Image: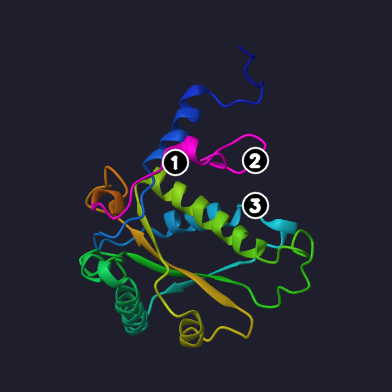
Amino acid sequence: MSAASPHRYAQAEVDAVYRAIRERRDMRHFLPDAVDPALLERLLQAAHHAPSVGFMQPWRFIRIRDAQLRARIHAAVERERVATAQALGEREDEFMKLKVEGILDCGELLVAALMDKREPHLFGRRTMPQMDLASLACALQNMWLAARAEGLGMGWVSLFEPDALARLLHMPEGAAPVAVVCLGHVPAFYGKPMLEQQNWAARRPLHELVADDKWPGEDR
């Protein structure tokens, strides 16, 4: 057995990190209680300390405070929810029974977006320009894990037409919304991911997704 790294955290801190990862949930059920501003600042700081390719920091967050604007975002998501259900064919009715967002219920609503004028950032993106999106995803994951540690729920909503939401939020040309983020207090955290609880999908065994030296499952 190899020796532990001298840079390792204390065991209780290590356990806390893995617990947050294991118990993080994409939440849809929220309480209307307000989120303390200092706590919201901590969560945004957690997002802002995410890794980014070329240190480009492509994330932008818009806090939605206007009730009418929140309602318009909800309406945009609802339109896409119906369109997605129709595109699913035989699973349409099953999908429509799922709760897929908590936009009107959560204490805080944010829109996470990619900045405009990203083209000059070539470091790490020359052959893979999508790494700006990967960087924003890292920021959202940081926020998610910090929120879970703080006892707040977070939900990532992607059911919207990006250009329409960009116009609604007066984003400059080239900027792109990626997530509507529901954030707030919750009555309880799901014991399992909600889509797993609802039998929509199941977590695949790790061994099916990891392999040595070749694509997983190549011999099957």
Are circles 2 and 1 on residues that touch, CB within 8 Å? no
Tag 3: residue type? Pro
Q: Residue at x 45, y 47 (%)?
A: 145
Say which element carries label 1. helix
Instruction: Reply yes or no: does residue 151 show up in magenta.
Output: no
Disc 2 versus disc 1: nearer the observer: 2
Residue indicated by mark 3:
51
Q: Residue at x 32, y 49 (%)?
A: 193
Tag 2: residue type? Lys
Judged from this view, the residue extending furthest toward the front is: 220
Magenta region: which residues? 198-220
Are circles 2 and 3 on residues that touch, CB within 8 Å? no
Q: Which mark is residue 21?
A: 1
Magenta-colored segment: predominant secondary structure: loop
Residue 104 visible: no
Residue indicated by mark 2:
214
Q: Is residue 78 left or right of residue 42?
A: left
